[in-house]
Image (cartoon, grey):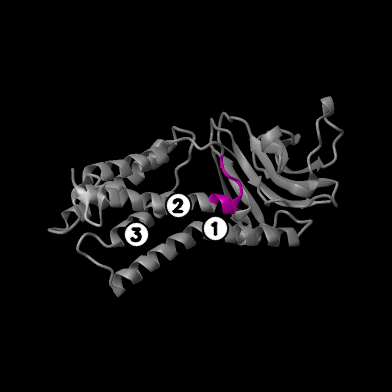
Amino acid sequence: MKTNEHAPTAPVWPRRTLGLGGILVVGVSLVVPVGGSITDPWRAGAWNLLHLPGFFLLTRSFLVLFGGTSRCLRPLFSSAALAILAAFASEWVQRWVGRSGSIEDLVLDGFGIALGLAWPIRNHRWCPTRKSIFGVVLLSGVAFALGPALLQERAETKASEGLPVIGDFQDKQCLRLWKAQGGAVATADPASGRLVVQVRSGSFGGVQFLPGEQDWTPYSEVRLNVSNPGAPLFLGVRIDDHLSSRDRVWISSAATLEEGVTEIVIPLRPPLPREGRRTIDLSKVTRLALFFEKMEKPVEFSILSAELR
């Protein structure tokens, strides 16, 4: 049995075993279900950051399996190609195991692959150029993973400072807090000060306001002005707090959108729910959702204003 020259009593793991082991570990981690979606932006950013070490390890495992680049650069290109293929394949597979794929994940996978290629290989040692490339790629990957959380936090702070208005659609940053859900597309129109929501046929969809944890205790109702250009529509409304995803307690409401502009009033202090269930914590409101059930044909509506009173 071969031994490690620096520690003669320690066995040397075969190259093939190390390479296949690394590939197996990363492959399993990419397809294992992880539960529900992460709503906290910093936790989501930290989770996304795991793509860097994951694809660094995957790329290095391919290189170990192919024997490094001591003789030619073919293993380098082969490892990069296989790692890129694995990135696309994992995003496709994740849709079927309760996880979601995204372009952002692919970009982070690319940063991890670049880190794996920039790390010294066999006879190639660290040099100032390699160190600079590795450092720039690493910092860029971290910034790309955590940057959205910072921007989200700034948007939440600005939105809280702007209360009682919760829908300033003249601000281009509003889409950081007002986001489409389900089979819908939401587009802010700053010129007219409205948010246009389009929902395709045959799908659940709408729009949701995600302010982090916003304090609505000084207010008694939400007022929205919604424009509907076509036939009457039945719109569902829901308001969540920070515990709603756990105990399924929220404020439910509904409204019929007639053709033209409809004012929707949502009371924030309904009677105590039956069976003594709690009322939502208005000091930590996390979500206001406007949605349709599956529609027979595409629909469109616009939110002209949204404020607390």
CB contact under 8 Å: marks 1 and 2 = yes
Dot 1 alpha-carbon crowd within 10 angstroms: few under 14, some 14 to 19, many 20 or more: some
In the rendered structure, the answer to whether residue 152 lies left or right of residue 143 reads right
Q: Position of residue 273 (x, y in %)?
A: 82, 30
Q: Nearer the viewer, mark 2 or mark 3?
A: 3
Viewer-nearest residue: 3 or 289: 3
Q: Earlier in the sequence, mark 1 or mark 2?
A: 2
Q: Secondary structure at mark 2?
A: helix
Q: CA distance from mark 3 to mark 1?
A: 21 Å
Mark 3 residue type: Leu
Answer whether residue 43 is magenta in the image. Answer: yes
**Which residue is depicted at the point 21% across and 59% down?**
122
Number of the label disc, if any, that sits on residue 104: 2
Mark 1 residue type: Pro
Q: Earlier in the sequence, mark 2 or mark 3?
A: 2
Q: Determine the image quadrant of residue 165.
A: bottom right
Is residue 191 at least partly visible in the picture? Answer: no
Q: Secondary structure at mark 3?
A: helix
Mark 2 residue type: Glu
Quarter in which the N terminus is drawn: top left
Q: CA distance from mark 1 to mark 2?
A: 11 Å
In the rendered structure, the answer to whether residue 207 lies left or right of residue 136 reads right
* Magenta extent: 37-44
Q: What residue would you read off at disc 1?
A: 148
**Which residue is depicted at the point 70% across and 38% down?**
244
Q: Nearer the viewer, mark 3 or mark 1?
A: 3
Q: Secondary structure at mark 1?
A: helix
Q: Position of residue 170 (x, y in %)?
A: 66, 61
Q: What residue would you read off at disc 3?
A: 115
In the rendered structure, the answer to whether residue 112 lies left or right of residue 305 reads left
Compared to residue 132, the image places residue 278 above or below, namely: above
**Which residue is depicted at the point 52% across and 58% down?**
146
